[in-house]
Image (cartoon, coloured by chain):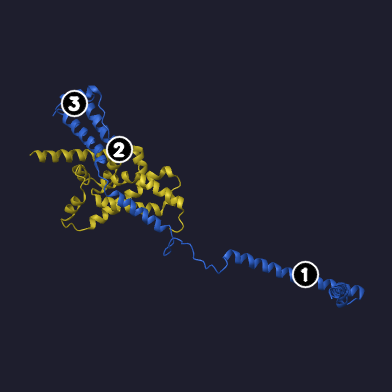
Chain colours: A yellow, B blue
Amino acid sequence: MVGVSLERREAFARLFSQLSPRLYRTALGILGNPHDAGDALQEAGLKAFRYFGTLHEEEAGAAWLTRILINACYDQGRKRSRLVATGLELEREEAAAPEHETDWELVQAMQQLPEEQRTTVTLRFFQDLTIPQIAHVMGVPDGTVKSRLHTALQRLRTSLTAKRREGIQ
Amino acid sequence: MKPQVVGSACFRVQEALDESLSEGTLTLPAELAAHAVRCPRCGPEVAQTEELLSRLRGAAATIGLGILPSVVDHVMSETVAWSLPAGIRAPEPAMQSPTQPRTHTRWVLGQVAAVAAVLVVTTSLVTYSMLKINEAVSGVKPGEVLAHLVTPFQNMNTAELRNSK
């Protein structure tokens, strides 16, 4: 990555800074904890800069960056799944996440969904993308997005209702 | 529970709920919303779906962004480092000795000296060639021609010296 022009770097900085809040929220929705979300966003940012020259239209930057982020999240998720659970993770995450107002119950329920359904729900609600926009980002037909969303929301509804019942009892 | 009759209010609520799960938004016409309020079958499902969609819509806004500035800063600092060749720092102004001419001036002086040398050599060669041609045509030797050219100046100098004495 030698000789990147100042203009190019500024364009990247502008795009990344502008999109980083919604990208971070997306990563959190997919991964379920702030540390992994931060790592995935950082990885995605560095990768995006490395290949920024391949992005010819700046308007397509949001979808392009989101796609890179989703792949970084999947990689991060695989890395995490290879780690042996020690029981210290939850303590560490809670200590590092003072955002007590975050709906962690919902975020954790989302983590029980398969990867693609979780991503679809996250893009729909955390990035507020339309069905065609999600289809574009994920490279699948609109019908597939609808079907994934339907299954995911049905599961979430069942899971959260069951938890509520457990809480009442 | 009774099976749903096609076209009934319960059936249409179920259709709307199915649609809402595929789209992520729930909009019930007033008539069906009124039905859901009093129907023991549709009511809970509508309420649960509305609550889920509302929680999902609100969740993004509640996510704290405390970790974000450090992540963005790190990415930005990495991009600055990558913009330079490995092992090379940003260029600093070079120190120059006041006794040495600047590189540019030296280059210009070198060019002028080279052009002057070429002119001297060319003029000498042309003059020599002309004298040789003259010798071949008229038989007058180059030395005689030079003496003929130089004599008036010699005479003039001699006269000047005499006058000054």
Residue A124 location in percent, x, y? 30, 39
Secondary structure at numbered mark 1:
helix
Secondary structure at numbered mark 3:
helix
Q: Which chain letter goes with mark 3?
A: B
Q: Which mark is residue B56?
A: none
Residue holding disc 1 = B123
Of the residues under marks 1 and 3, which one precedes in the sequence?
Answer: 3
Q: Is residue A1 above or below residue B44?
A: below
Residue holding disc 2 = A146
Taking depth in this image into account, of B101 and B24 the one nearest to the observer is B101
Q: Is residue B25 visible?
A: yes
Taking depth in this image into account, of A112 and B152 the one nearest to the observer is B152
In the picture, measured across the screen, residue B146 lies left or right of residue B2, that is: right
Residue B7 location in percent, x, y? 24, 24
Does mark 3 fall on the same chain as mark 1? yes
Q: Nearer the viewer's eye, disc 2 or disc 3? A: 3
Q: Is residue A139 visible?
A: no
Q: How many C-alpha atoms fall within 10 Å of the one at disc 3: few (<14), some, or many (≥20)? A: many
Q: How many C-alpha atoms fall within 10 Å of the one at disc 2: few (<14), some, or many (≥20)? A: many
| Tally of marks | 3
Q: Amino acid at mark 3?
A: Ala
Location of residue B165 (image quadrant): bottom right
Does mark 3 fall on the same chain as mark 2? no
In the picture, measured across the screen, residue A44 lies left or right of residue B157, that is: left
Residue holding disc 3 = B36
Taking depth in this image into account, of A51 and A94 the one nearest to the observer is A94
Q: Which chain letter goes with mark 1?
A: B
Mark 2 vs mark 3, CA separation in Å: 24 Å
Mark 1 vs mark 3, CA separation in Å: 111 Å
Query: Is mark 1 in CB contact (under 8 Å) with mark 3?
Result: no
